[in-house]
Amino acid sequence: FRKGETDNLAGLIWAGIGTVILLIYWISRENFWKIKLSNDTYLYVHKNVPNEQTTDAFVNDLMRSRNEYLKENYTNIDENLSYETQLNSLKWLKSIEVLTKSEFDQKYEELKRTVKPDKTNIGFGN
C-alpha cells in the first residue's frame, strides 16, 4: 500500500466504525428512560438493566419523591407572598402533573381565601 491508499483506507475504517456506533445508539435509545433535569440536561436510565420491573420501580419512586418535594415546597399558601407568584406556581405544578385538577382547585380556592389579588386602578379611579 502507498501512503495515500492507507490514509483512504483508515478514513473508510473510521467512517465505518462511526456509522456502526451511530446505528447502535439509534437502535438502543428506545431502551432508555429520559428524565429531564435542570439546565437542559437529562438523566438516562436503561429500561432493562438490571430488569424492567426494577427500573420501573426506580423511576416511579424517583417521580413520587420529586412530586412530594415540589408539593412540600410550592403548595404552601402564604399571605405574605404575591397572589400572582403563588398562582403561577400552582399552574406550573398542575402543568407538570404534580397536582391533579382537584388538588389544584382546592389550593386555588385556598389561595383566593387567603391572599387577595392586588387590584390596581387604571385611569381615573376612586
Image (cartoon, rainbow, N blue to C red):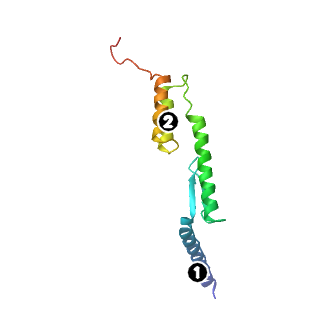
Q: Which is more foreground, mark 1 or mark 2?
A: 2
- What x and y, as percent, mark residue 80? 55, 22
Q: Determine crowd level at label 1: few under 14, some 14-19, many 20+ residues with C-alpha closer than 10 A.
A: few
The quadrant of the picture occupied by the N terminus is: bottom right
| Residue at (49, 27) in percent of width and height | 111
- What x and y, as percent, mark residue 37? 59, 49
Residue matched to label 2:
90
The quadrant of the picture occupied by the C terminus is: top left
| Residue at (60, 84) in percent of width and height | 5
| Residue at (58, 40) in percent of width and height | 70
For numbered disc 1, what is the local secondary structure? helix
Residue 71: which quarter of the image? top right
Residue type at numbered disc 2: Leu
Cα separation between marks 1 and 2: 60 Å
Query: 36 or 96, which is in the foreground?
Result: 96
Query: 76 or 106, which is in the foreground?
Result: 106
Q: Which residue lies furthest to the right in this view?
A: 50
Q: Determine crowd level at label 2: few under 14, some 14-19, many 20+ residues with C-alpha closer than 10 A.
A: many
- What x and y, as percent, mark residue 22? 56, 70
User: Against 25, is 11 above or below?
Assistant: below
- What x and y, as percent, mark residue 110? 49, 28
Q: Which is nearer the N-term, disc 1 or disc 2?
A: 1
Q: Residue furthest bottom?
A: 1
Residue type at numbered disc 1: Asn
User: Against 15, is 50 above or below?
Assistant: above
Residue matched to label 1:
8
Q: Residue furthest left?
A: 124
